[in-house]
Image (cartoon, grey):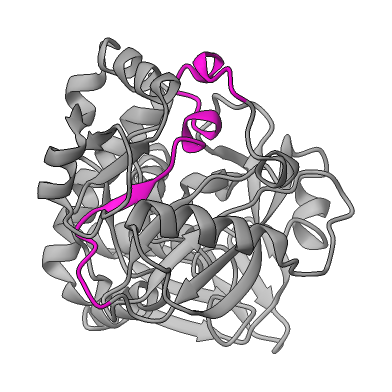
Amino acid sequence: MRIVIVGGGVLGTMHAWWAIERGHQVVHLEREAEARGASVRNFGLVWVSGRLDGPDVETALRARELWEGIGAAVPGVGFRPAGSLTICRTEAEVAVAEAALREESAGVRGLRLLSRADARALNPALGGEFLAALHCERDAAVESRVALPALRAHMAASGRYTWLPGREVRDVATGSVRDDHGDTHEADQVVLATGAWLGGLVRELAPDLPIRKVRLQMAQTAPLDTPLTTAVADGDSFRYYPFFRSEGLTEPQAPIAAEHKMQLLMVQRLDGGLTIGDTHEYEHPFGFDVVEPPYDHLTEVASAILGRPLPRILRRWAGVYAQCLDPRAVLHRSQPLPGVWLVTGPGGRGMTGSPAMAEKTAEEAGW
């Protein structure tokens, strides 16, 4: 079978992965020289802990299993089964963590509540004051900035994968894709995985998508001189991830965190730097500025958890991802034309869930 994938981000790349794994020929088109959207502007987290019960957490758990296998086959993706610790600094946050442990799915998520001493034994970099930490054993991380080239190199070795960057698609029909170089690529199946790019051709094919865009701000620091052995979240993440019963958090957020709909997530990269974030902006038109007060807040919270000054921020960026309007929906998957699949709207789940999302497309498409 000849399969054309449009979109070089992690969701498109994982669709290419499954097509190659199942013995097909793949042509993979990307309008930029390299993926530059949300697939590389993220934490690299494979995040199980906060996903809703049902398809959301099932997708995350399946993807976590797949990422581990992919990481063994392609060491360049930098897979680490590090788990996470959500730091509880108030009694109300401890109560939310305790409530999570009573949920039926707590076991498959690998949740347990640790004392400060036990949390520090697991992650000695946590030198700040806190009451307890919710450990999620199933959370993991990959290196988002380098994972996609590593995956493409592995697929290219099959002899059945062709990567064509710098090509914007101008026309899609059943059986073919035409790019802006004037080349037509014949296909038995087409997958459109164009991320937050939903105008132009995508709008013509599917004008009423139940999708919104979300803008975020993140940053990366200079190397921390000690290992951060798990991913780290603060108690505000309980407000953001729908699995947790955040109505128990009766104390208001810090004003800047509430204004920018913030949580702290913190992941150490293989070079020792820390990726920190993030904000969430939902109302269009988005601002075009990268503003400083959220970074001040992130620095303050991260420093308090570490019990030491955060390393200097070296990079700051904004990103935009596409998210389904239905909070229970894991992904929008449809066929605007026979043999043409549109996959979009994973929201903040793209890096986490893309292997399982693509696997499901492959099964439904009969690859």
Q: Say if the magenta span includes residue 131.
A: no
Is residue 191 visible to us here? no
Residue at the spot x=35%, y=29% of the render? 57
Residue toward you, 184 or 310: 310
The image position of residue 178, as x and y in percent, is 68, 75
Q: How many marks?
A: 0
Q: Which residues are magenta?
A: 225-251
In what quadrant of the picture does the N terminus appear? bottom left
Residue 13 versus residue 198 in the image, above or below: below
Residue at the spot x=45%, y=35% of the render? 235
The image position of residue 275, as x and y in percent, is 43, 66
Residue toward you, 351 or 90: 90
Residue at the spot x=84%, y=56% of the render? 286
Residue 26 versus residue 367 in the image, above or below: below
Specify the quadrant of the image occupied by residue 325: top right
Residue 271 versus residue 306 in the image, above or below: below
Residue toward you, 139 or 360: 139
The image position of residue 126, as x and y in percent, is 26, 54
Is residue 209 visible to us here? yes
Left or right: where does residue 327 sit relative to residue 74?
A: right
Left or right: where does residue 264 sit relative to residue 283?
A: left
Characterize the magenta stretch by its predominant secondary structure. Answer: loop
Residue 290 versus residue 232 in the image, above or below: below
The image position of residue 274, as x and y in percent, is 39, 69
